[in-house]
Image (cartoon, rainbow, N blue to C red):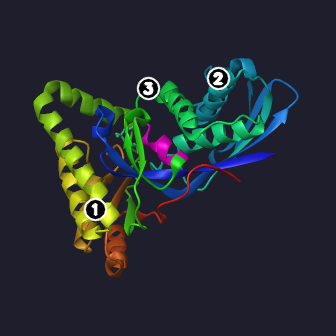
Amino acid sequence: MIKASAPGKLMLFGEHAVVYNKPCIVAAVDHRIGVSLEKREDRKIVLSAPDINFKNYVALIDDLVKSHPKKVRFVLTSVFNFFEKYKIKSGLDIETKSEFSDRIGLGSSSAVVVSTIKALSELFEIEVGKKEIFDLAYKTVLDIQGVGSGFDVAAAIYGGFLLFVKGGKTIKSIKTEKIPLVVGYTGVKADTSTLVKRVSERLKENPKGINKIFEEIERIVNLAEIEMENQNWEKIGKLMSLNQDLLRNLGISSKELENLIRAALKGGAYGAKLSGAGGGDCMIAVTCKEEQDRVKKEIERVGGKIIEVKIPAKGVRVE
Ligand code: PMV
């Protein structure tokens, strides 16, 4: 049996603008998704995902991309694309195991796609480089979701902190230490495609104003890259709050996110922002070590749930 695992992610800077070819900064987090594979003699793909209550779901290898439930589509489309590219057909037993919920926005879909492709390359003894995994995994995510920059796919493959440009045009590792981050979950599931669509509508209505916001975000991302290398967390916090002001102006923040962000600042965080598409999911705050507990308590006091994460985490690996 072959097993591979890949980490989840948190967007630190640059969400939405990255869809329009501006850079972003993403961190891989130590919550991983593992995929185990074994060959079968017949033409069945038998998939179990106990974390999401799927047991022995059967798909035929000639029928991999047709009307399967959303929860298994990422794995099955990964297998389909891998078989197409490398001209393979084989029955498989697949089991996925997740260390985190698919409802909090930590990138479970991209992590499962990347783990599946890595495990397949091991199982069939095909050498597939990181960029090749990226291209195949990004295609798989686009096949299903239709939109996305691929930042989450890059985090799952390369790990660490990355400066990233859409489609993998830039994937550059940022050298820094562990950033003192607090993560608060709003309890609301964000709908990424709806929010990406909302921004594209705003761009159509007001191209000048929205492009100005994207340019400001780009400036913040470039400064943040330097300050991360300097490990100047106070400055990183300030830049996060500036990034949040711009995201708020884009119209993708929410009452719940704003509550948690306000609480983090009240608790003494250097700065805070939403992370990802907005509308819900998680917010992040940078604090000094001494204030970390106070920031967590304030977030909890207003109804947020603290998600304990260690960052950066290592990228995809065979277990
Ligand atoms: O909702 P998430 O956590 O997948 O983040 C989406 C980030 C966007 O920039 C809005 C879209 C993207 O794919 O970059």
Residue 104 percent across, percent down from the top left: 46, 51
User: Which residue carries the number 2 mark?
Assistant: 85
Considering only order in the chain, which callout, 1 or 2, is on the residue closer to the N terminus? 2
Ligand 1 shows up in the quarter that is top left
The mark closer to the camera, 2 or 3, is 2
Crowd around label 1: few <14 · some 14–19 · many ≥20 (10 Å):
some
Marks 2 and 3 in Cβ contact (< 8 Å): no
Please name the amino acid that badge 3 sits on.
Gly
Amino acid under disc 1: Glu
Quadrant position of the N terminus in the picture: top right
The residue lying at 38 percent from left, 61 percent from top is 184
Q: Is residue 280 visible?
A: no
Relative vertical location of residue 258 with respect to residue 113 in this rendering, above or below: below
Q: Residue furthest bottom?
A: 290
Residue 151 part of the magenta-drawn span: yes
Are the residues flagged by discs 1 and 3 in contact, CB closer than 8 Å? no
Mark with earlier residue (2, 3): 2
Where, quadrant-wise, is the C terminus in this rendering? bottom right
Q: How many marks?
A: 3
Judge depth for marks 1 and 3 and give the one in front. Answer: 1
Earlier sequence position, callout 1 versus callout 3:
3
The label shown at residue 146 is 3
The residue depicted at 14 percent of the width and 28 percent of the height is 207
Assign the magenta stretch its main secondary structure.
Answer: helix
**Label 1, label 3: how far apart the Cα atoms are:** 34 Å
Q: Identify the image quadrant of residue 179.
A: bottom left
**Mark sitting on residue 227:** 1
**Image quadrant in which you'd find residue 305:** bottom left
Decide if residue 154 is on the left or right side of residue 196.
right
Which residue is at the front of the view, 261 or 127? 127
Say which element carries label 1: helix
